[in-house]
Image (spheres, rainbow, N blue to C red):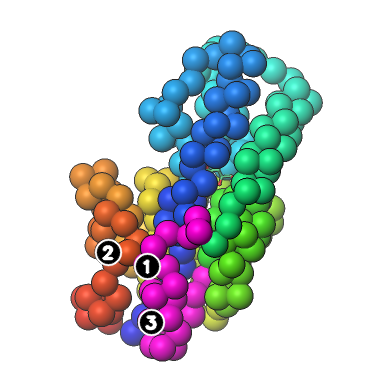
């Protein structure tokens, strides 16, 4: 039976993607590289240095490691200024209710966010106490689509991957869940997230009874 639900943060529980976009767009402009919302879609679930590399490649710009770290830091400071204004109002509808149902069913709740700012974001959203374990993105060696982050959360919770449901909005993240050997819920467009066992347009549409009923035993 299912013993844990492991959630992605950005795009699943809240919309920080817009703030990541604004901060990356400002940097791209400074570097003279064209970067729009469509480009930003490809950065979902991708870690900070990977995202910067995507933008540099797009502009055909080659920088030293020192320069890359300086620009990544600059983007991060800008991003942190933007998320400072987040509050409980930014939590997606349906999350409190879903967490309450999971607790009622004695199912553990984990967080597998690639963001090094995840602790600050869940604090702002007022849900930091809801998690049984929150992955530390700084300690994860291989980012999504590698399964390391989801496997680390399951292991820390003491639950086998097959007894976990992973919830993701990004393709990279969905791949990590599948390669971790977990059951998968996609949040977003069913045409894009075809590989997920269940897809819901929004977290508030997720039916826990249905997932638990249909999960592979
Ligand atoms: P940071 P998630 C990811 O969060 C974002 O989707 C991605 O756009 C971002 O680049 C990444 O975190 C790293 O974030 O720069 O704050 O460490 O979707 O895995 O919750
Ligand atoms: Mg995400």
Q: Residue 141 at x, y = what percent?
A: 64, 51
Q: Is residue 34 left or right of residue 165?
A: right
Which element is circle 3 on?
helix
Q: Give the labeled residue for mark 3.
A: 101
Mark 2, other Cα within 10 Å: few <14 / some 14–19 / many ≥20: few
Kindly report which numbered mark, 3 or 1, lies closer to the viewer in this rendering. Answer: 1
Mark 3, other Cα within 10 Å: few <14 / some 14–19 / many ≥20: some
Q: Label 1, label 2: how many angstroms apart (C-alpha)?
A: 8 Å
The span shown in magenta is 89-110
Mark 1, other Cα within 10 Å: few <14 / some 14–19 / many ≥20: some
Which residue is nearer to you in this view: 85 or 137? 85
Looking at the image, is 180 positioned above or below residue 160? above
Quadrant in the rendering for residue 3: bottom left
Which residue is located at x 60 percent, y 24 percent? Answer: 26
Q: Label 3, label 1: how many angstroms apart (C-alpha)?
A: 11 Å
Q: Which mark is residue 94?
A: 1
């Amino acid at each position: 039976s299912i013993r844990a639900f492991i959630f992605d943060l950005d795009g699943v529980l809240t919309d920080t993607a817009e703030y990541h976009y604004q901060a990356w767009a400002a940097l791209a402009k400074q570097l003279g590289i064209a970067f729009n919302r469509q480009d930003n879609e490809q950065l979902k679930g991708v870690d900070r240095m990977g995202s910067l590399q995507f933008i540099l490649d797009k502009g055909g710009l080659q920088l030293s490691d020192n320069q890359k770290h300086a620009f990544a830091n600059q983007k991060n400071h800008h991003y942190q200024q933007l998320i400072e204004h987040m509050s409980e109002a930014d939590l997606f509808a349906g999350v409190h209710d879903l967490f309450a149902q999971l607790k009622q069913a004695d199912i553990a709740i984990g967080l597998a966010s690639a963001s090094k700012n995840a602790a600050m974001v869940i604090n702002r959203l007022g849900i930091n106490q809801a998690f049984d374990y929150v992955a530390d993105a700084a300690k994860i060696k291989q980012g999504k689509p590698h399964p390391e982050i989801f496997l680390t959360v399951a292991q820390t919770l003491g639950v086998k991957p097959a007894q976990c449901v992973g919830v993701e909005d990004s393709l990279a993240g969905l791949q990590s869940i599948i390669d971790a050997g977990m059951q998968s819920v996609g949040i977003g467009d069913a045409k894009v997230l075809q590989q997920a066992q269940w897809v819901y347009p929004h977290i508030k549409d997720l039916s826990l009874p249905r997932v638990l009923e249909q999960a592979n035993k």
